[in-house]
Amino acid sequence: MIRFTRRLLLALAAGTALVAPPAKAQPSFPNRTLTVIVPFAAGGPTDTVSRLVAEAMGRDLGQTMVVENVGGAGGTLGAQRVANARPDGHTVLLHHIGMATTPTLYRRLAYDPVAGYEPIGLVTDVPMTLIARHNFPATTLAEAVAIIQRDTDKLNYANAGIGAASHLCGLLLMSAVNAPMTTVPFRGTGPAMQELLAGRIDLMCDQTTNTTEQILGNQVKAYAVTTPARIGALPNLPTSAEGGLPAFEVSVWHGLYAPRGTPAEIVNRLSHALQVALRDPRLVARFRELGTEPVAQDRATPAAHRAFWQADIAKWRPIIQAAGQFAD
Ligand code: MLT
């Protein structure tokens, strides 16, 4: 007679195997709060995108994802923080087109602006808008250009430092109209916007994620959106081509990066969480309110991000070298 132990009977009754169920695999990643380093001040466009992405990614990862603003030097201080971070996936960088211009603009960095990272995936392409203080005496882009050309040495233009999207957009504008205005650098266009709203800054080119609400609220003058076609969030804002400056076109791509040496399975897990975040209805709705869209899912992968990033570095290198303007 087979002596059925109590455990055997219970197991048979429960239809479970005798062997202990596999211990619940402790998720090796993530195992604590994650940090997204934003290389510009709080309240600006990069910060806005990052907070929306961090909240949605955190839901998929099952851990809080906090945003830490590390502004300064056109975004390179924040980028360096991540290049030097432990490659365990808990510290990532959300940055933009500056990752393509920095390798040429900055020649003496204390970190490698390319090899220092593992791309995780692209996030969004954000249009830019040319705006001015609310009492700037121009209604159209053509009128604004005429004033910029007449009063070049009296006007100031805000940006977030050399290599920032606001800096690159300003370069395009000033070269298109041949009017090198005085530029005033900030740790981000969040603080710059406050100075423009106060009337102490005359003009700025900034992303719709930081200007849409001010434009719709008539708090600033707006002259152009730097995309080939008008955007749904600002249907009454002409494109730069409609305003007579077809060369004044630029959009700001954003990507997510881990430090070099982050294991591939962790990079892939982060990319999966990013792709889930970019499908989140709340994030998509807020992006659209702010004039942008998440990238297509197949662009939010490490391979697609790496290919795009390398191509954009190669695109901007001769442009910057020809301009001969470097940060150091
Ligand atoms: C820039 O490149 O101008 C930055 O996006 C500004 C910011 O995010 O504060």
Image: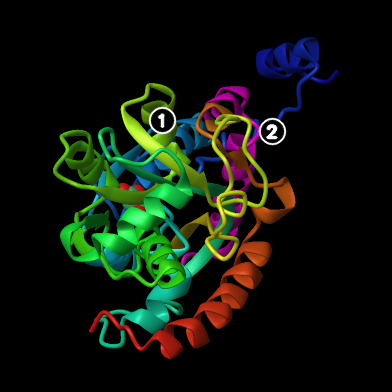
Q: Position of residue 83 (x, y in %)?
A: 34, 69
Residue 134, compared with residue 264, is above or below; it is above
Q: Determine whether, in the image, residue 269 is placed left or right of residue 208.
A: right
Q: Could you tell me if the residues under marks 1 and 2 are in contact, i.e. CB atoms within 8 Å?
A: no
**Residue drawn at x 41%, y 30% as measured from the top left:** 215
- Quarter of the image with the C terminus is bottom left
Whether residue 259 is visible to the viewer of this picture, yes or no, is: no
Q: Residues within 10 Å of mark 2 (few under 14, many from 20)?
A: few
Magenta range is 261-286
Q: Residues within 10 Å of mark 1 (few under 14, many from 20)?
A: many
Residue behind mark 2: 19
- Identify which amino acid the numbered label 2 is placed on: Val
Residue 282, percent from left and from top: 56, 22
- In reply to whether residue 270 is colored magenta, the answer given is yes
**Ligand 1 lies under 8 Å from the Cβ of mark 2:** no
Instruction: Describe residue 233's horizontal placement relative to residue 12 as left or right.
Output: left
Mark 1 and ligand 1: say if the CB distance to the nearest ligand atom is below 8 Å: no
Q: Secondary structure at mark 2?
A: loop
For the residues labelled 1 and 2, the Cα–Cα distance comes to 65 Å
Q: Is residue 134 above or below residue 76?
A: above
Mark sitting earlier along the chain (1/2)? 2
Does residue 229 belong to the magenta stretch? Answer: no
> Residue flagged by tag 1: what amino acid is it?
Ile
Q: Position of residue 3 (x, y in %)?
A: 76, 18
Which of 76 and 5 lies nearest the eye of the viewer?
76
- Residue bearing the label numbered 1: 215
